[in-house]
Structures are given as C-alpha cells and as structure tokens.
Amino acid sequence: MAKRIDVTDLDIYYGAFKAVEGVTFSVEPRSVTALIGPSGCGKSTVLRTLNRMHEVIPGAYADGSVLLDGEDVYGSDVDPVNVRRTIGMVFQRPNPFPTMSIKDNVLAGLKLQSGRRPKSEMETVVERSLRGANLWDEVKDRLDRPGASLSGGQQQRLCIARAIAVEPQVLLMDEPCSALDPISTLAIEDLIEELKERYTIVIVTHNMQQAARVSDTTAFFNLAGVGKPGRLIEIAATQVMFSNPTQQATEDYISGRFG
Amino acid sequence: MADLTERERHGSDELLHAALAGGKLPRWAVPALGVGAVLLAFLLNVTTSVDGVAGTLVVAVLIFVGAQTGWSFRVEGRRHAVDRLATTGVYATFLIALAPLVAVLATVIVKGAQVISSTFLLTSMRNVSSVAEGGGVYHALIGTLEQVGIAALIGIPLGILTAIYLVEYAPSARSRRLGHAISFFVDVMTGVPSVVVGLFVYTAFVLTLGMQRSGFAGSIALTILMLPVVVRSTEEMLRIVPRDLREASYALGIPKWRTILSVVLPTATAGIITGAMLAVARVAGETAPLLLTTFLSQSINNDPFSGPQASLPIFIWDQFTRGTDASVNRAWGGALVLIVLVMLLYLTAKIISRFTGVKKF
C-alpha cells in the first residue's frame, strides 16, 4: 500500500522567483519524515510539490523529478488529479467543507471523484475513516451535523478522515497542529503514530519537539537570505539529527540559537 | 511608619480611582435632552420666525446636538463629547436615508391599495377608456413575468458562467488578455444607459434582423442590462470563497470542474442568489428599453414571441400620462403590484438561500 518517494534535483519557482533549489531526498514507505526549518525556507513549497498541489497557484512550477515508487509524478502523461488521489494532503488550518455534514465531508473525495456507490459501502467508509482518525466515538451520533460545528481539533481530525477516506498511499501534512491546542495536538500526534503503519507520511512542522516525537527521519531546510532560494541542508534519522547533526546550521537551529 | 504607608496607600488608591473614573451624564440625559429640544423648538415656532414642520425639526435637532455636546464636554470631557456628536450624526444620517424609502413605500401602498381588487389583478385594459373606472393589470403582469422570466433564464446562467471564468479560469490562463477584456466590457456594460440598450436591441434585432416588436425583444434588452450586475455580484461572492476550500478539494483528487460545481458554488450560493435576485428586481422596473422593444398593449398577449406585449412599468407610465383620476389611480395600483412582485422575488430568494449553501450550527 504505502509507497516510497524519491526527489531528485528539485527546483521550484513562483513565476520568475526561485523559491527552492536543488533538493534531493528520499522518503521510505511506512515512515514519518519531518521537514523543519525557519519560515520562508520552502519546506511547505517542497511538500506541495510532492502531490502537484504547488501548481494550482498561477505561475508556479517545478523542475526536477519526483518519483513515486519509481513512477515520475511530473511525467508528461501523468494527470495531476490522479497524483492527488494517490498522495493525500492535510492543511495547516482545518478546512472542512462548510456546506457539508460531517458524513458528507468524509465522503467528499469518493463522491466527487467517481460518483455514486452503494450506500452500505459509503457507511463502511465513513466509519472506517472516522475510526482511523480517532474521531468516530466523538461524532458517531451526529454524523448529519455540519462539519463546521466541531471544535478546531475535531475539525482537523475530520480533515484527516476525509483525506484517508480516499485511501491514498502517501499522506502529506502541512503544519497540521499549528492551529490547535496541546491536547488536540497530542491526539493528532498519536494518530500519526498509528497512520504510519499504513501510510507514508511527510509532515512539515515548526515545532521541534513534535518533529522529535513523531518522525523517523528529519530534513532541515534553510535559506541563505531573504530573496534567495531555500535549500535542503541536511537529512538524517531523527535521533541523529537531534543529537549529533553534521552541519553547524542544523545544530544552531535545533538548539534554538537562530530561527 | 505603618500609619504613613496606610495613608500613602489610601492616597494612591484615590489617585488611581481618579485616573480610571470619569464624569458621566445621567441615564435620563439623552431622552430628557430630546424632549427638551423638541419643546424648545416648538416654543420658538410659536414665538419667533421659526416656521413649518421641517424648520422646527431642524431647529430641534440643532438644539439637541448643541446642548448634548456642550453638557457632555463639561461633564465627561472632550472624547465623550465627540463620541456623542458622532453617534447623533450617524443616527441622523440613517434616518435621513431611510426617510425617502419609507415615504415611497407608504405613498405607493396608500394610493395603490385603493384600486387593488381581484378585478384589477385579473382583467386587462382592453376597451377600458381613460376616464372610466375598472380595468386592470393582468396583461401587464403576464408581460412582466414572461419578459423578466426569460431575461433571468438567459441572463443568470450566462452571468454566473462568466463570473466563474473570470474567477476560476482567467487567473491561470496562459494569456490574461481575455479575462481583462471581459472584465473591462462588463464594467462598460454597467454604465450603458438602459434606453441605449433598448435602442440597440431595436436597431439590431427589430430593424436589422426583422424580429417583431415582442416581449422577447424586451427580454433581450433586459438580459443585457442584467448581465453585468449578475457577473459582478457573482464574482464578488466567488472571490470570498477561501482558497483553502479549493485546495482541500484538489488535494482529495477532485477535478477542477467538480470542485467548482460541488464545493465553490454551494459555498457561495446564498450570495449568488441574492445578487441574481437584485439584478432581476432591478430590471423588472425598467421602462425605457421596453418602450422601444415590446411597445405597449392594452390587451392580454400570452405569447412573448409575437406582437406587442404590455408590462408593469409601461402600464404605469401609460396610465400616468393619461392624466385622468381613474388612470392615475390605476398607475398607483400598478406600482404597488410591481413593488409587491419584486418583494416576493426577493423573499423567495432569501428563503431559498437559507436552505442551501453554508450550514449553520
């Protein structure tokens, strides 16, 4: 199910502006990879390039290769819509669809991708996805209430349930806890730990402790200065990164000396 | 020593209180000032050259504003005085703005209600002379419903689709030219006087293409007038749909057209419906373009595609220019029917938009 990702020589542009330069790294299947670094260093941009979400911004494009189990997601005959079905994404701010109930939010991907399916199958998907996101017990009695009626932390788990309902192979998370309180954050982190068994996860975070807690591998991004492109400085097993990084910049950032 | 600190502390408490508290006008100040100002103005009306209702009212307001600001300045200080002055100003302008609306509604209801009856709603003006009582708006009501209905049927989808292109497709198009051009012409269309649109439809469709003067020719003119309003309002509504929602949808592997149809449009429904209804209401009262395209008729014509057809605005204009008591009364009746029709449309739109779109808690 879960797939590996190999990124080679990735340059990412917003129009004429080069935001990220020369990024090369790999993500192992069934692992959590954390992308850390100061604001503006391009870690979210790199994340969005992995499922071609980057290009929905007018003028934005990427150069280089992103391989999903050896298949180039930027190949000329590849449909970005299919890429996104395979590589799901959870955003910084919880964004349930305001016109839909909790249940319809979970089913949105399935229904809007490929139309009608038998009702019983839908019910199964709703329960499985909500259980997968640790939200089932809290919402099982009010599946027809609007998604926006939930608390922030619940909304974010609803968004995770929505993302896993379409059964992607990889889950990208862009600072999924930055708008949440510590208890909701803990719930999401526990969830990431469980999801890891079935999905390949790449997570962007500003919270170093979170990176240390949830990830197997950590990648540190940095930029030389304002207006310069961001670069991947170092990537290694999380334990190594946090105890014995090879680069001075990594150590400075992790120990809080800058950024 | 302890005594001293006690006194010091007490002293500083008083200082603190003085710093935090401020003078305040009593609760009864505003109503009392209001009543006082009106009484004083009335007195001036009787004793001096202050004259008339409007004059007395203006004097009363000036007395109220002056007394309140002065008193407040003495007791409460400058900031509160300015605040009260601005508050009074805001309320006063609100009332002034509301006055014409209420006056128009009241006049139309009072004068129109006299002639409204089932006969008035269900008969035409065929064989009814200007001086005679009786007759009705049925033919005009049918005409307006058909003409505006057809205009809405063409104009609303066209306008919404244009707005979708402008918001969802133009920014990512390879060339921005088309988007800019459409946007420019929509702005130009907003400014074209309705009589010019009528003239255009008359020249292009009736004279050049040989179409008859008919309800449908009127509908074309109304569509043209309606289009820019629908485009602009829909555009505004689509722009305030957060980009987050579109991205959430794309990230689920939902194609762009489906995202627009099932995520963006439903989120903006309430606003789009309101905008479309305002556009419909706006053109329902258009007279000039219809005069050139549908002409006028005193009899019932159910077919919008052939022959002159009446409409409410033209009925009102026609009856009013006849000048007899009976016809002027009918004009007021027609005006009331038109206003009620527009209000019904608006209410229906509000009800529809309440049950669709964003779900509340």
Image (cartoon, grey):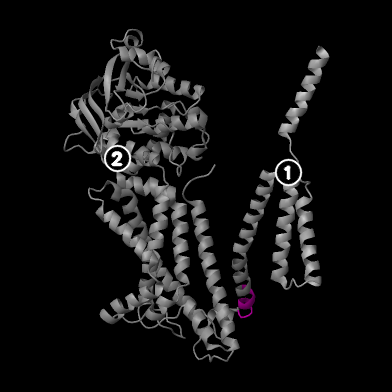
Question: Could you say where residue A35 lies in the image, as x and y percent from the top left?
Answer: 33, 22
Q: Determine which residue is flagged by label 1.
A: B76
Quadrant location, the C terminus of chain B = top right
| B155 lies above or below A257 | below
Give the magenta part as a residue range: B109-115
Q: Which chain letter goes with mark 2?
A: A
Q: Residue furthest left?
A: A76
Task: Give the residue type that dot 1 points to.
Answer: Glu
Picture quarter containing residue A71?
Answer: top left
A44 left or right of A79 in image: right
Q: Residues within 10 Å of mark 2 (few under 14, many from 20)?
A: some
Q: Determine which residue is flagged by label 2.
A: A56
Picture quarter containing residue B64?
Answer: bottom right
Q: Which chain letter goes with mark 1?
A: B
Is residue A199 in view?
Answer: no
Which one is closest to the eye, mark 2 or mark 1? 1
- Marks counted in the figure total 2
Q: Residue furthest right?
A: B3
Q: Residue at x 58, y 91 (%)?
A: B132
Q: Residues within 10 Å of mark 1 (few under 14, many from 20)?
A: some
Task: Give the residue type that dot 2 points to.
Answer: Val
Q: Secondary structure at mark 2?
A: helix
Question: Could you say where residue B184 lies in the image, as x and y percent from the top left?
Answer: 32, 59
Q: Could you tell me what secondary structure mostly forms the magenta stretch?
A: helix
A93 left or right of B181 in image: right
Disc 2 to disc 1: CB gap under 8 Å: no
Q: Residue at x 36, y 13 (%)?
A: A252
Which of A17/B24 is in front?
B24
